[in-house]
DNA sequence: CGTAACATTGATTGTCTTCAATACGGGTGG
DNA sequence: CCACCCGTATTGAAGACAATCAATGTTACG
């Protein structure tokens, strides 16, 4: 998935060195400041990247989903910049550093898709700042629901805990809960199951445009 | 600066294709959504990257200084993701795409420092979220002053306008002004000239740790 | 059935926004 | 030179908004 057009000669090497891993909800994929020795490509599930501050507080700085890559910094020999935690059961594809080095050395043109990923991460970071850190709490929460809802059919939207919402939006969990309740009362959000809810994306979109 | 160890054979090509440019304060380095054909390395000055939202509002998502690179996305053929505006007189080194392509093709090992830059941008984005979008306005402003003050001798700190502060911190310019005034009254900040101020970084640091 | 984890709601306090007025500083033109 | 004007900064007062502390509901699970 990460390297879309891998030459035949490398397939064997990849087969032998890439393995799938399952993480149950709430388990850590890796810990901030650890020295990374692999790259993780998310197959299914949802992962939060948490930045832990020296004073003990934490802040979610990104959400990763199917197709996203965690731990790019390992390629450069840097320790992981975040603690990565699964928010749902998550399946990842683990790519050890040796494989990355192999690819980069013998097939430098493959570094292009890698740069694409880097840029994508940056775009996501910007989007996080712009959509989730800006404006009234209600607007930011609407943005978050839209973010969680894209690429899902029939308006279904992954549900995440109030505390995680709060940490992402820079508000308290009580405020997150109040606004969610309000959305429900207004019919913008309906609970479907423990893991999904149905959202009126048009109305939510309208909320964000003012 | 960007490519630290360029082989002799390429120096001539670089000399011919890289030129310096000066931007006066408030002038645009480039415009969001333009198709980029060059990379800009900041020599001196200060540049804000502004994300323009569809509804007309804007948000600063990053600040660039000496050694930072703007427009990495151009390498990948993407349009610029931000509008880049000089906050002071700024000198940049403009590197056209042809040069980048040349470097990447003939000397693939040079892509490593490029990746380093990418990662650095990402780290800055994270820092922006964590330090400038989190907590009370006072704490965020303290973080901003610390950011503006690093790598300057004797506690001098670049002054930026209240509106820019506000856009960076997600607050109103009045709130930014009030807090700055309060900092001055408390002796944490003193105006030196129109462009610089002296900050008590230890005290500001303390503010952020709670 | 009891308990633990999470969500909701209420009441109060504190912070930030909003709208509005005023102050300041650096020009320009009379 | 001075009066004026512009852009920016400061300050005030009112109300909106979110944080905080605390209590009550809800759900899942042993």
Image (spheres, coloured by chain):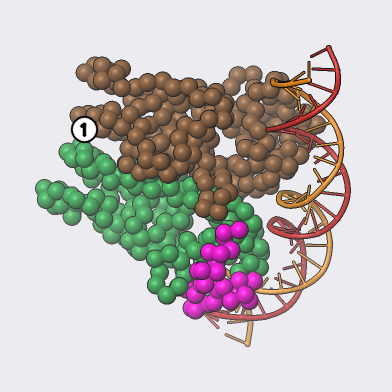
Chain colours: A green, B brown, C orange, D red
Task: Please give the residue where the numbered disc 1 appears in the rendered image.
Answer: B105
Q: Is residue B27 left or right of residue A124?
A: right
Residue A113 location in percent, x, y? 28, 46
Residue closest to the eye, A159 or C16: C16
Q: Nearer the viewer, residue B151 or A146?
A: A146
- Residue at x 26%, y 41% (from the top left corner): A111
The one nearer the camera, A63 or A15, is: A63
Compared to B80, does D16 lie above or below?
below
The image quarter containing residue A175 is bottom right
Residue A194 drawn in magenta: yes
Q: Is residue A32 magenta?
A: no
| Residue A192 visible from this viewpoint | yes
Could you tell me residue B2's position as x and y percent? 37, 26
**Count of numbered badges drawn on the protein:** 1
Residue A116 appears in which quarter of the rendering? top left
Percent from the top left, x then y, of residue D15?
81, 59
Secondary element under disc 1, as helix, strand or loop, is helix
| Screen quadrant of the N terminus of chain B | top left
In the rendered image of this protein, does residue B41 appear above or below residue B61? Answer: above
**Residue at x 58%, y 76% (from the top left corner):** A187
Q: State the image coordinates of residue C27 (x, y, percent, origin top left).
A: 69, 20
A78 lies left or right of A5: right
Q: Residue at x 30, y 54 (%)?
A: A94
Residue B40 position (above or below residue A8): above
Q: Chain of mark 1?
A: B
Q: Residue at x 33, y 25 (%)?
A: B3
Q: Can the viewer see residue B63?
A: no
- The image quadrant where one finds the C terminus of chain B is top right
Residue B47 located left or right of residue A74 = right
Tell me which segment is drawn in magenta: A182-210
From the viewer's perspective, tell me whether residue B72 is left or right of residue D18.
left
């Amino acid at each position: 998935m990460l390297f879309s057009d891998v030459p035949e000669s490398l397939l064997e090497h990849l087969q032998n060195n890439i393995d799938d891993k399952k993480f149950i909800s709430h388990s850590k994929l890796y810990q901030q400041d650890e020295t990374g020795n692999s790259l993780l490509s998310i197959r299914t599930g949802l992962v939060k990247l948490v930045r832990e501050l020296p004073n003990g507080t934490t802040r979610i700085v990104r959400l990763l989903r199917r197709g996203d890559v965690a731990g790019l910094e390992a390629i450069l020999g840097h320790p992981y910049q975040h603690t990565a935690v699964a928010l749902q059961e998550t399946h990842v594809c683990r790519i050890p550093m040796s494989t990355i080095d192999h690819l980069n050395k013998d097939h430098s043109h493959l570094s292009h898709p890698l740069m694409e990923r880097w840029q994508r991460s940056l775009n996501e970071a910007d989007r996080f700042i712009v959509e989730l850190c800006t404006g009234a709490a209600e607007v930011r929460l609407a943005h978050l629901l839209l973010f969680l809802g894209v690429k899902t059919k029939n308006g279904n939207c992954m549900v995440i805990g109030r505390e995680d919402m709060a940490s992402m939006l820079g508000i308290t969990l009580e405020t997150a809960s109040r606004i969610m309740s309000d959305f429900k009362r207004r019919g913008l959000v309906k609970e479907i199951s423990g893991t999904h809810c149905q959202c009126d994306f048009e109305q939510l979109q309208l909320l964000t445009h003012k």
